[in-house]
Amino acid sequence: MTAPLLAVAGLGVAYGEIAALRDVSLTVGPGEAVALLGANGSGKSSLLRAVMGLVPIAAGSIAVAGREIAALPPERRARLGLGYAPEGRRVFAGMSVDDNLDVACRGGAAERRRRRTSVLALFPQLAEHGSRRAWQLSGGQQQMLAIGRALMTAPSVLLLDEPSLGLSPLLTAQLLARIRTICDGGTAILLAEQNVVQALAICDRAYVLQTGRVVAAGPARDFAQDPTLRRVFLGADPARSG
Amino acid sequence: MIAFQLLINALALGAAYALVALGFVLILNATGAVNFAQGDLVMAGGYVAIALAPLLPVPALLLLPLVLLVMAVLGLLLSALAYFPLLARPPSAVFISTIAVGIVLQNGANAIFGAAPRAAPPLLGAGDLALGGIVLSRQSVAIIAVASLLVLVQHLIISRTQFGRALRATAQDREMARAIGIGANAMIAASFALGAALAGAAGLLLANQFFVTPTAGSDLVVKAYIAVAIGGWGSLWGAVAGALLIAVFEVGVSSVLSYTAAAAGLYAALLAILVIRPQGFFGEAAQRRA
């Protein structure tokens, strides 16, 4: 087995006295899409933010392609291959769509154009809005822009925090299908999602977080086919959350 | 005729104010903090020109690149002393630290150059230009040209270059900028360098007609503040427009009444703006107020 692209071991994060994550370990391998499931407040966002270096960690290690990164600032982690599309999108609202994409690319002008072309091929809805300000886009377009911006860094692992938040079921389905396409293109995915059924459908493996701990892990297919697992760990009613 | 000459004078003054205000907004956007030393940086730029002039007996225009460079370094120093050590503190700590740096600059200038007003050499040469029946001060025309060029270059850097995009991204969402690989602290330091360089350029431009004294900056930072309040917090073009408006108002009122009346009117206008339309008249909705 090849070394995982992302390896988190024994990770702990605390906000003051309150532990948000306890002894969390997970891996994302090359070409994998991994779902991070759990209810609101289970620690999904904290985990992604800790991996990105946006919250301090209290314990544990984080490695990208075998290199320990837990002591590095976020910008160094991004340059080592972590892409991040945060919860709430956080596009640069006053900047144009093109600038939002371009700013994330550290290559030269030719490389910027090349990457922008491939991002726009993935999200054709953005192509016609190149010079519009990001705040003028719809929620779905902003989400595509946030993901596209992360892709402009040419990441080896893409961290996605609740990309379907606030989107219609139709848009959610389209977006998640696109995320699978990104993964099939060679970028590994760690996807935090509340949309359990749809996330499991596009992911290879899944971890379930509950109050800051990993309480279940395994192939996505097993979760998808096991209603008990889903009810116990995810509180999801299969009839409702499809 | 008189009105036209007054307008040219006002535009020259406004163009210099615009540089001060632009630098002020660049730092404000990058840090969310008001740089109260901005006026003193203008004063410092004037003295840098005055100090360089005897060493290099050339028109002040040729001193400009050197002044920009020295002032950019001073801007980096300002960020290292007054901003970065206070990152974990509330923004008010930075207000106070920039005021402190301003006081240090004032007293430093007083110790080195004395309190008496000094003048830098003119940009291209003294005297007037006669265009048809109109007599224009060569210096005023040169100020307008140089300041317009600097505003344009600044605009191109901010809007068209990758460096400018990174500056804007850092200003809008520092954490997110870092998460896509931008060295946000380097961008903040660069904003200070750019802001100080623009202030220094204004200092050079003003230091011939208006003289420099160690305390000349306190007046200018208030004008930058008013220009930015008029222009909308964070808007670069708004700051330029605000600066021009202030200068036209100042020159207009002082030609009819007095400079004191103009200053009083300006402060009254600032109060009215802050009460009635705190987001200013130009830019987008303010992100944050300082």
Image: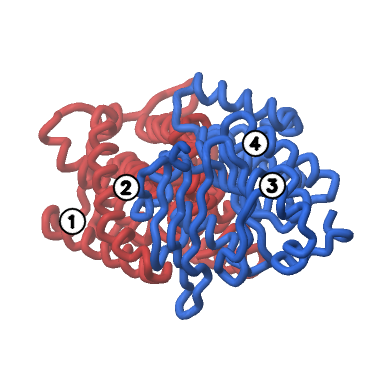
Chain colours: A blue, B red
Q: Residues within 10 Å of mark 1 (few under 14, many from 20)?
A: many
Work out whether A112 lies above or below A188: above
Q: Position of residue B74 (x, y in %)?
A: 25, 48
- Is residue B101 toward the left or the right of residue A164 in the image? left
- For mark 3, what is the residue? A135
Q: Which residue is mark 4?
A: A97
| Mark 1 on the same chain as mark 4 | no
- Pinpoint residue A69: horizontal percent, then vertical percent: 37, 49
Which residue bears the numbered disc 2? Answer: B210
The 10 Å Cα crowd at callout 4, few under 14, some 14 to 19, many 20 or more, is: many
Q: Is label 1 in contact with label 3 (beta carbons under 8 Å)?
A: no
Q: Is residue A46 visible?
A: yes
In 3D space, how far apart are the residues under numbered discs 2 and 1 (Cα atoms)? 17 Å
Distance, label 1 to label 3, CA atoms, is 46 Å
Residue type of the residue flagged with mark 1:
Ala
Amino acid type shown at disc 3: Trp
The residue at 47%/52% (across/down) is A52
- Residue B171 horizontal side relative to residue B114, left or right: right
The answer to which quarter of the image holds residue B216 is: bottom left
| Residue pointed to by mark 1 | B109
The kind of secondary structure element at disc 1 is helix
Secondary structure category for the residue under label 2: loop
Residue B135's label in the rendered image is: none
Please name whichever residue, B119 or A3, is drawn nearer the observer in this view of the structure: A3
Is disc 2 surrounded by few (<14), some (14 to 19) or many (20+) residues within 10 Å?
A: some
**Gap between marks 2 and 4, in whole Å?**
44 Å
Which chain is mark 1 on?
B
Residue B1 visible, this angle:
no
Quick one: A112 or A95, which is closer to the camera? A112
Nearest to the eye among marks 2 and 3: give it. 3
Q: Are marks 2 and 4 on the same chain?
A: no
